[in-house]
Amino acid sequence: MHNHPKQPFPILLVACLVIPALISQPTFSAEPTPGKFSSTYTESPIRNKERRHWSFLPIANPKPPTVRMNNWPKNSIDRFILARLEDANLTPTRPADKLTLLRRVTFDLTGLPPTPAQQKTFLADTSPKAYEKVIDRLLKSPAYGQRWAQHWLDVARFAETDGFEHDKTRPNAWKFRDWVINALNNDLPLDQFIRLQIAADELKPNDPSAAPATGFLMAGPDMPDINSQIERRHTKLNEITSAVGQAFMGLTLQCAACHDHKFDPVSQADFYRLRAVFANILHPRNSRPFPTIVKEKSGKSPATHLMLRGDFRRKGQPLTPAFLRITNPNNQTLKPLTLKSSSGRRAAFANWLTSPNHPLTARVIVNRIWMHHFVNPLVATPNDFGTMGDPPTHPKLLDYLANHLIKSKWKLKAFHKFLLTSATYQQASRRSDNTRAATVDSKNKLLWRMNRRRLSGEEIRDTLLAITSHLSKRTGGIGVKPPLPREIASTLLKGQWKPSLDKADHTRRSIYIFARRNLRYPIFDTFDRPAADTSCARRARSVTAPQSLILLNSSLSLDSARRLAGRIFTTPNASTPIMRITIAYEFALSRKPTSSEITLATAFLIQQAKTLASSNRKPADLALPIPIPKSIPTSQAAAFTDLCLALFNLNEFIYVD
């Protein structure tokens, strides 16, 4: 669903949740009739065949297999990968060179490139622990949480506006974003990370720092000015239930709001029993916005019912809160925690969800983490572990990793290090000595090499700002608004994007840019940032002409080229053209240029300087470095800006090997 960015609201949710509620029948009033409900629904039992689906079985504890090539594995992950390769008569690829590995792991953990100084330090460190020291340094960096928070915000459908026609601002939504960043940087165990997003107000009622976590539940779209506030509440509760199912259990529950799931063993009653967990969430009156953190009604919880065909006007049989039957084979009862000002239902649900015996939660989490390091997840459908989702390419490895996470007390940073120190991760992404591997496994499902990854729009923007020494270190607070191109700003309603007054905010990290649901920042949109209407588990990776155009022609690219040129001209050891070319490559591509690249770049600078000089253009009309070097002719200085811009447009600049 996230592949349709122009949709104001996901098609599936409209079909399953909204359309039935709008079907007018003469026997129904505009609002439900109190005290009356239909009992025409009958719930089907779950069959043994359905319980045997791989994702609903208990997590196994497989042992790492024996392999013939015993000198290759660095940890147990490699034994699972190598065993499959040996079964297919394939061999792993050679290790990546040091600078390639440094660039890869630095982008993966921080979303930023390694600096020339960091490159030099890593090359000079010949100790066996040199690579581990890099990982430890990156995991301690504030940039780590700023990068990895965006992965979760995609899943959490985070935005700072409501969506729909008016797309009104949510003034405090940013607090959830900041909570996620801080939780990751502080290495909050992932089981607590999950529980607090569902029930922080119940689990830690006296901890103000935990309160923003429940912003996850409220992060989805909303239409405050809908005619029926009862319908609005119905739609919102359905959306929360669906988001919880996708994000934490990898199940597409939304269809069960209208009818029994067509493919997965999830009944309509299952859906509304789970929805009852959230039924006591405070609903605002008079078309006011929902709070961005969860508050519950005081007093007795409201009665909950199945809604026939998903119609909020057609109450079916009464239901009590319960866990999904397919993930609860022992029929464990949901026992709410006894609390004074809250129902205690969400806390009980959150504890069950993060139980080591839950078949889905740990599997879903490790699959997401694996995907962001290895590009392709073990389960290709991260939000759908049901019968219509893809089966895992390495089922034993998936369960082994899930067990490893649980036994490691759900510590994410340690889990990162476990993945990143594997020989599988450290492979090169290219090889020319094994055409058979490309034939047998063209999609690299067996991981006989590392996958290449294209940078996201956020990473590209942050990189351009970082290498020019122009990236602000400010953190936190309401989303900032850099200026928009006039042609985009003109399409918005008055006041919807007023640029931040402090220009220093215009160069903050991309995660702090105001997340408007109906308008994505241009470079993010061009490079496949998803709409925030629904949970996005895996971003699209398109290759389009506008991507090339924005890197070549945008004010961001040109300004960054000028600033990088200016930074290089002011570097003490950049006294010759070859030295400047070398430093430019180190900043842009995290490596030194080859001799042929130096020859080509030198020839370009000479020819481009001649072309600019012969054009008789005024200095003000040239793309001069910032600051302008005083001892260099303007034509030569502008030519170097053009070289920097050319480096930004290399394939290697936006792809990580």
Image (spheres, rainbow, N blue to C red):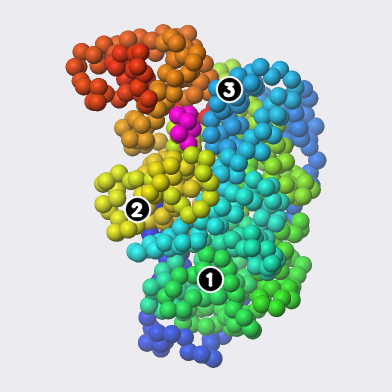
Q: Is residue 157 above or below residue 395?
A: below
Label 2: element kind:
loop
Q: Residue at x 42, y 25 (%)?
A: 564
Q: Quadrant of residue 144?
A: top right
* Category of crowding for the residue at label 1, using alpha-carbon neighbours closer than 10 angstroms: few (below 14), some (14–19), many (at least 20): many
Q: Residue at x 34, y 57 (%)?
A: 496
Q: Position of residue 458 (x, y in %)?
A: 47, 41
Q: Are marks 3 and 1 in contact (CB under 8 Å)?
A: no
Mark 1 residue type: Leu
Which residue position is annotated with label 1? 237
Task: State which region is magenta.
Answer: 466-471
Left or right? Give the position of 623 relative to 444: left
Which residue position is annotated with label 2? 498
Mark 3 residue type: Ala
Please state which of residues 203 and 410 is positioned toward the viewer in this rendering: 203
Q: Residue at x 39, y 30 (%)?
A: 560
Check residue 117 in the rendering and tell me which mark sits there, or answer none: 3
